[in-house]
Amino acid sequence: MPQYTAPLDDLAFVIHDVLKVTEQDIPGYEELSDDITSVILEEAGKLASNVYAPLNLVGDQQGCRLEDGKVVVPTGFTEAYRKYCEGGWAALDIPEEYGGQGLPGVLALAVLEIFSSANHSLSMYSSLSHGAWKAIYHHGSEELKQTFLHKMATGEWSGTMNLTESHCGTDIGLIRTKAEALQDGSYKVTGSKIFISSGDHEMAENIIHLVLARQPDAPAGIKGISLFVVPKYLVNDDGSLGERNGVSVGSLEHKMGIHGNATCVLNYDDAIGFLVGEPNKGLQAMFTMMNVARIGTGMQGLCQASSAYQNAVEYAKDRLQGRSVTGTENPDGPADPIIVHPDVRRMLMDQKSYIEAGRLFCFWCVVLEDRHTRSKDENANNLLSLLTPVVKAFLSDKGYESATNAQQVLGGHGYIEEWGMSQFVRDARITMLYEGANGVQALDLVGRKLAAKGGKPIMVFGMMVKELADSLECDEVLSALVTQPLLAALGDFQAACTYLMQNGMKNPNAALAGSTDFLHLMGHLCFGYMLGLSAQAAQQGLTSGEGNKEFYQQKLITVQHYLTRQLPMTRMHLKRIQAGPDTIMSPSAESF
């Protein structure tokens, strides 16, 4: 059975050595001392390793089932969820006024990584609730906040996001679910939603659904969509649960992965709902939840890669097969462990470098979010908006790739269910699809985000990369290690931006045909930038003479691996962008 151990040293390195959280001028960050963060993450690691991880395979094998209209979750999930709630994990970064602990989002992200790595399906029940909580908190009326947020903070009530319908996914403007106003100010919601993660279960007393619907007199398209809170059980004036609302489970989806999570078809039959925010402004409110979910989805891709990598490393150290080409390394055994073979090491180093870069990228972005929410810094928000599609798509693409590489390390055993590696691959696959398929993220990046705010965020990002590269040039070690490859990648990025600006307006297909390549080019540059920060912190650790010398040296080797073997892929993506759209758009539909 696969195992999971929280990477506490790596998390501490990111939080304290690289991001230097206690030195940030963000309110609340001064509380994140090493003593506090280490205790919190160690306790999360214990729950993840001892409770969540052993249930991962159970959830995959049992899945969820529908009995008499109720969803039954896999054995052990309910008890694990209750331990999670009792430990206060659901309320870690929720403001104290709503029953939370008020800690910064960067620490909550570290805890999310630990639980999601241990059990993707189980952790989804709480992570989606967190996004729903934020949507109500930022856009709901005071009455809605007082009614729902306290119970959601404790995990007693959970939450979902209802967008997709059977005839429309990304094109939300086509939704048919309707909401009719009632005299008491509530609404009657009718329609059907599909692909609703954590859509129903008995682990929480109530489930708070956030539902996109259209009022009868609303404008067509996305300009006529409103957002509604539709609870599974209505809530009485005293806060107690009332009668069952008109929402039911039509069926459970049969999926490739995340079997332990209840992905539901939900039917709304004159269900009572309450408007969130202004009429016809539902997408603005829903995007608060979706942007949280998109960063979380990128993290989920990273988590599947991290768990798969841990198990691949253990297998590679134990599995005896063949001899090292440079001489026997296990003379007392019949063969050497496969970790001596260069191609196995190549796969493991690719995974290791992706995980370390991706982790730092996620955490760095959540620091931007904290800076915006806690310091009202709009520049941080603009940069985060630019990078969100890259976080979601690049991390999930590379997470799936890394999970398959980990499976490959096990050879034939990686294809056998009892080893658990196929589950990591299957569970990672969904991260490329939900919260906006990755091709759509690329279209959003090229079609909307590059030109947003007059192109200022993209210029700021390029300047940040250039400043880091220049600042490391005076260091003999870091100049060769980081500055040169990072500037080369930046040059490819700038050339790609120039091509898109020069050709995109006159021929939109020229831009959109290269959108995925551009997102990956930018993703590699983001990873290069993150690993530049990592190298800087590791070198400072070595220079100080404090801490674990070998740990810092390994960080520098990981940086070198990515910057020499992965970062040069920016040139390939540039060439593909510059190739233009002809081979893609000229064939007729019948020719495919």
Image (tube, rainbow, N blue to C red):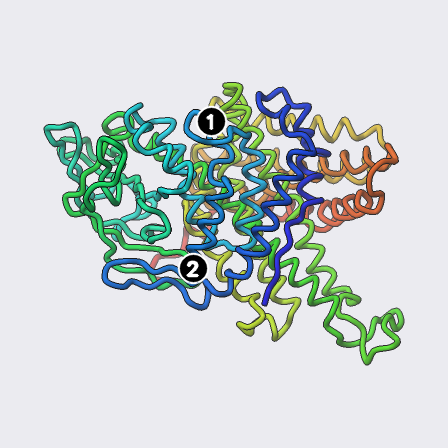
Q: In the displayed structure, does residue 34 sit left or right of residue 511?
A: right
Q: Kindly identify which residue carries mark 2.
A: 260
- Which three-letter amino acid code belongs to the residue tagged 1? Glu
In terms of depth relative to the viewer, which is nearer, 144 or 387? Answer: 144
Q: In the displayed structure, does residue 367 sit left or right of residue 158?
A: right
Q: Residues within 10 Å of mark 2 (few under 14, many from 20)?
A: many
Quarter that holds the C terminus? bottom left
**Secondary structure type for disc 1:** helix
Q: Badges 2 and 1: C-beta atoms under 8 Å apart?
A: no
Q: In the displayed structure, does residue 484 sit left or right of residue 66?
A: right
In the depicted structure, whether residue 327 falls above or below residue 95: below
- Which three-letter amino acid code belongs to the residue tagged 2? Gly
Could you give the CA–CA distance between mark 2 and mark 1, rounded to whole angstroms?
A: 32 Å
Quarter that holds the N terminus? bottom right
In the depicted structure, whether residue 480 falls above or below residue 123: above
Q: In the rendered structure, which disc, 2 or 1, sits on the residue that comes first in sequence?
A: 1
Residue at 51% of width from left, 55% of height from top?
119
The answer to whether residue 591 is visible is no
| Residue 472 % position (x, y) | 79, 30
Q: Residues within 10 Å of mark 1 (few under 14, many from 20)?
A: some
| Residue 361 % position (x, y) | 61, 39
Q: Kindly identify which residue carries mark 1.
A: 96
In terms of depth relative to the viewer, which is nearer, 145 or 415? Answer: 145
